[in-house]
Amino acid sequence: MAVAYRHFAASEKRKTVEPPAPQISPVLLSQDELKKLAAYKAVEYVESGMVVGLGTGSTAKHAVDRIGELLRLGKLEKIVGIPTSKATHAQAVALGIPLSDLNAHPILDLAIDGADEVDPHMNLVKGRGGSLLREKMVEAASKKFVVIVDESKLVGHLGGSGLAMPVEIVPFCWEFTLKRLEMLFMEAGCVGRLRTAAGDSNQPFVTDNGNYIIDLYFKKDMGDLKAASDAILRLAGVVEHGMFLDMATTVIVAGKLGVTVTNQVGN
């Protein structure tokens, strides 16, 4: 079942940008170190007593590690984490972070997660790690959603990296669903591929929810994102897609010049 969330026209969005805080010897930082910088900056938004959505992926992992560290040091207390995947659940348990779910906490104070692409309007592509449905459910339920990326994830438009825009689908007749997804975006030169399991290209990748993922690749801009989102979600067999439109309240970008924080006005 698709998750409903609000859409706004990109031209209506207003942002405030904090200038980058310069780093010492930034040229020496690896991509993973940049991810860690962004993640640690995001954890500064976490306060004792909060219910926090815990993201999935290589960047979000740093944020979860940091929350666990601050709990262990007594600098954070009474945190409840809502994990967005089985992998994050296991990580949080190992760190001693108390966990719950959306049934017990339908409204979260904050969610922190990475993204695969971020466009100039703070729209996102997520889900290349395979956890897009749970991520969207948790992050749509959060009062604030802080996105953490390194500068390589910035794009002019969604799909602009040439990498996958994932769509989670039911396994039943997946080839039929793949072809219908391709037909939606023929003018954008869309090609769909079934994601396969790591280390076994003969087996499909299976999400935590028991579904498959079709990765869509675009040669051109897909156009109106709201219309694209609605068209995908209308297809029977589609569970959810990896476009997170108008959901991010803060985007933290770590780059060679430092860390830049962009906020939607009012957040």
Image (tube, rainbow, N blue to C red):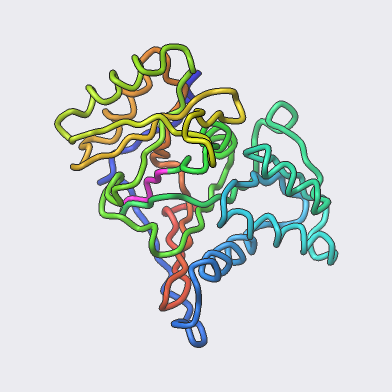
Name the spot of residue 160 as percent of width and height, x first: 27, 49
Nearer the observer, 231 or 186:
186
Nearer the observer, 164 or 13:
164
| Residue at 50% from the left image edge and 18% from the top image edge | 1
| Residue at 59% from the left image edge and 54% from the top image edge | 60
- Placement of 60 over or under 139, stated as above or below: below
| Residue at 46% from the left image edge and 52% from the top image edge | 266
Q: Is residue 182 left or right of residue 2?
A: left
| Residue at 34% from the left image edge and 24% from the top image edge | 232
Q: Is residue 248 left or right of residue 39?
A: left
- Placement of 30 over or under 67, stated as above or below: below
Range of residues picked out in magenta: 121-125
Name the spot of residue 153 as percent of width and height, x first: 39, 57
Name the spot of residue 241 as percent of width and height, x first: 42, 31
Name the spot of residue 2 as percent of width and height, x first: 47, 22
Q: Is residue 122 magenta?
A: yes
Number of marks present in the image shown: 0
Q: Is residue 42 left or right of residue 46?
A: left
- Placement of 28 over or under 152, stated as above or below: below
Q: Is residue 258 magenta?
A: no
Identify the image quadrant of residue 155. bottom left
Residue at the outermost left position: 187
Question: Which is the main secondary structure of the residues drawn in magenta?
Answer: loop
